[in-house]
Image: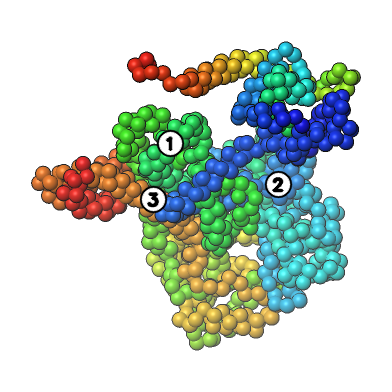
Amino acid sequence: MSTKEQQERIELLQGTLDLLILRTLLPGPTHGHAIAKAIEFRSDDVLQVEQGSLYPALHRLIKRGWISVQDGTSEHNRRAKFYRLTARGRRQLQVETGNWEKLAGAIARILRPAPTEGES
Amino acid sequence: MSRRKRMMENLNQEIRDFIERETQDNIERGMSPDEARYAALRKFGNMTQVEEETWAVWSFVWLEQLWQDVRCGLRQLHRNPGFTLVATLTLALGIGANTAIFSAVYAVLLKPLPFAHPGQLVRVFEANDRAGIGGEGCSYPEFQEWRRQNHVFSGMAAIQGHELNLTGRGEPMVVKVGDVTADFFPLLGVPPLAGRAFLPPDDDEGAAPVAVLSEGLWRSRFGADPNLIGKAIDLDKRSFTVVGVMPAGFRFSLDGRGGQLWIPIVQDPTFGPLAKRPNLGSFTAIARLKPEVTAAEGRAEMEALGNPLVQQYHPGDRGRTIRIASLREAMTGDAPAPLLVLLAAVGLVLLIACANVANLLLARATSRAREFAMRAALGAGRIRILRQLLTESAVLGLLGAAVGMALAYWGVQGLSGLLPPGFPRAESIRVDGSVLAFALLLSIGASLLFGLAPALFAADPQLHAALQESGGRPGEGKGRRRARNLLVTAEVALAMVLVVGAGLLIRSFAALLAVDPGFETRNIMKAEVSLPRFQYSTPQQWVAFSNEALARIQAQPDLHDTAVALPLPLADQSCNLSFSIANGAPQPPGTNHTADYVAVSPNYFQVIGIPLLRGRTFTAQDVMSTPRVAIISEELARTYFPNRDPLGQQLVFGFPPDTNVKREIVGVVGDVRDAALNKRPGPMMYVPFNQAPLWGVGLVIKTSSSAAAAANEIRAKVHEVDRDLPVTDVGWMFEAVDVSLGQAHLRTWLLGLFGALALVLAAAGIFGVISYSVSRRRREFGLRMALGASEQEVLRLVLKEALRLALAGVAAGLVLAVGLARLISSLLYGVRPADPATLIAAPLLLTGAALLAAYLPARRATRVDPMAALRYE
């Protein structure tokens, strides 16, 4: 194991995994392992996805009607379950992305050096 | 479970694929296969846990929340033991009473009859609306015509009830015998437990006498002897071969007559000969509609068939038709009306109980307002809070149902003991699965009823806004106070309906008790001896036996005042016979002039205390060889001889072969209620037993000795004459009166109980509302007293509030009660539905109870310390 893995990886915030999955599925249907890989790859291996938690999250999303699942064949002609974003999921992705940006912005403002008296 | 299994297998497969891909990736990155697989597994985490969590996404969320809410509800109940106890008991009383009454309603009205396709079974009977004749049986030849000519029934059977003496193997006993045609058992579709049912040849005249036993008789009398089939038993001293035994659940009773064993009609000593006569005998006909025939079609066909047949068998009887009714209707008789009234009554009790609990919950919701504000602030939605509160209500409701079911179980046991004999389907009244399901549904429904309003108020978002502003003590909104007042007013109104209903029944019952039956019931014992018809077949034999037995009994010093009468007053069967007046105007056909026929010994009127109004009583000289005489009742004299002296006139009546015998009226006696206490005395005609006897002997004895001693002496004396005769129905005459009042007594008692329950619950409701109001107005009372108001004035203030609520409820209830009282008019005797005494007493009672309930909290209001209350501001 590299030192980077041990020191720089951070755990996902509660609820953000759902958002990441929705975003990952935006380009097209994908199977479970590919989703996990995509999240790790796009975050430059910074985000540590406990791979197991992927499945409860996927099912939660199915139940809410944001993604759907169907059987398909993967790259090596293997059968696998493919997850696909639904129309509702697409809308949800927009909402959640907006929320996330607001949250991130707010936290960023708080973490900025304190402004001087009278400015606010 | 299979859904879970299928999903888990899919998931498991997918996870293994995932790990394989990860392993492959790792190998491509240069790890050894083992290392690669190990790393992949480690990165994935606990596989089983992942599977469980994934499954939980689908299944356990709502269940867990429900469990949370249930636990929360239980905690709440545990934390407020006083509230829990009061609410549970209130609900238990309501649910228990409903469950108990429902078990009777279910057994009598809803539970399918224990026969194959019971919906197809009907009773066929004759009626004449013009003459006011409801359901009459038919003669046997008529029945045969019906069976031969109709196209709508797949089978038809005639039945008749009778009692015969079963002798041999132990004490002689009287058994209830069902006389049936051979089609009876196949028609009902119940196969025998052992042996065979009847076959068509058994109906033929001259066939060997056969009998089918009920399981009960087979067990109790013959020790469930498996070899009884093919053996002979003695009925009225005639030998019958047992051919079959019916299973334990097989019971068939109609018109209060059930069978312990069955024989073909032709074999019955009384009804066999009657079966040949074209216009005699009231056989009951039952039939099974063909599957494709509706009841309406059956009715139409029988009506069409009836026209020529009625002309043939009842010439001149206009308006007479053949009808059909479902067998269930025929079997339940007039039991449904009081049952439905009782069911409605317990329904009202439950509504009152719900209103009480709702009021308690409303009060509690106010004090819990902060808790809900907190939950709402923490993100609980309105729906979530509603759900939690309703779950709490449901927990309370189920708790009430559990206790209520125990109450119902005991109630039903008690009820079964109280049911008057002959109550239809009494044996199937019990707390079974269907009844429990009803109780469960009822408790859920009740929970919604009492929980919804408080929950809606508690989950009201405006309240939370108000709470934030006031910041401290939660206030009670106007809407909520109005809801509480409305609930308690409704309670009083419903209680009013029940109290009026109970009052009317109690007044009727008192009127019934005050009724003079026309004869003495104290110190008078009665007993019956039934004679075997094959041994004692001639009137001479009946007279000889009666005189012999009477002489032996009268020889006992304490039984000297013994008389013979048949049938006895208030016995099951009265003997109604048509008569005509000799030399009178011919009566129009189709109208029946009937009177109750009784054969008595000369001293009967003196022993039982029926006054002789005119003429003479019978004497020892009135026998078969002397001129025929009769004594009539005052009612008959008044109706048929309004302006004439009945003495010396002649009536024509009698049993075959003496149907056309003229009898001279020699006396007039007082009226008696011989059929039932609630039936007005009808016309009666008495004949000397020694001149016109009936089978068997009824005894009335005026005695001061104990019932047991007298019974033993009577038995001994009868057995001196004939060892094989059972003496039955021994008891005091007033006990027969009680039996005659049985149904009225039971329903009065029950409705009285429910009325009292309603009264107490309504009073408790008033108490709760006023207590709560007083506790909220402490400061106001303190202020008033500080400003000089006296204790009296404060007391009056509080009582006035209670009085306002009570009067509103009483007024609404009075309107309701007057409207509803008409529905129970069929249960009333001697009082009108709008009985002034009841309609005055009930409001006074309720208002009094309300003021009494308000008095305690009102006293508390006067004890408010003005200084302490003011300091509180």
**Residue in the image at 57% along x and 61% along y:** B413
- The residue at the point 34 percent across, 16 percent down is A118
User: Where's residue A65, x and y in %?
Assistant: 66, 22
Helix, strand or loop under label 2? strand
The residue beneath circle 1 is B374
Q: In the displayed structure, would residue B379 be above or below residue B360?
A: above
Kindly check if marks 2 and 3 are in contact, taking CB atoms under 8 A apart as contact.
Answer: no
Is the residue marked by circle 3 packed among few (<14), some (14-19), or many (20+) residues within 10 Å?
many
Residue B761, numbered circle:
3
Kind of residue sitting beneath label 2? Ile
Give the quarter of the image for residue A4.
top right
- Can you tell which mark lies on residue B286? 2
- Visible in this render: residue B442? no
State the image coordinates of residue B574 (x, y, percent, origin top left).
56, 60
Q: Earlier in the sequence, mark 2 or mark 3?
A: 2
Disc assigned to residue B20: none
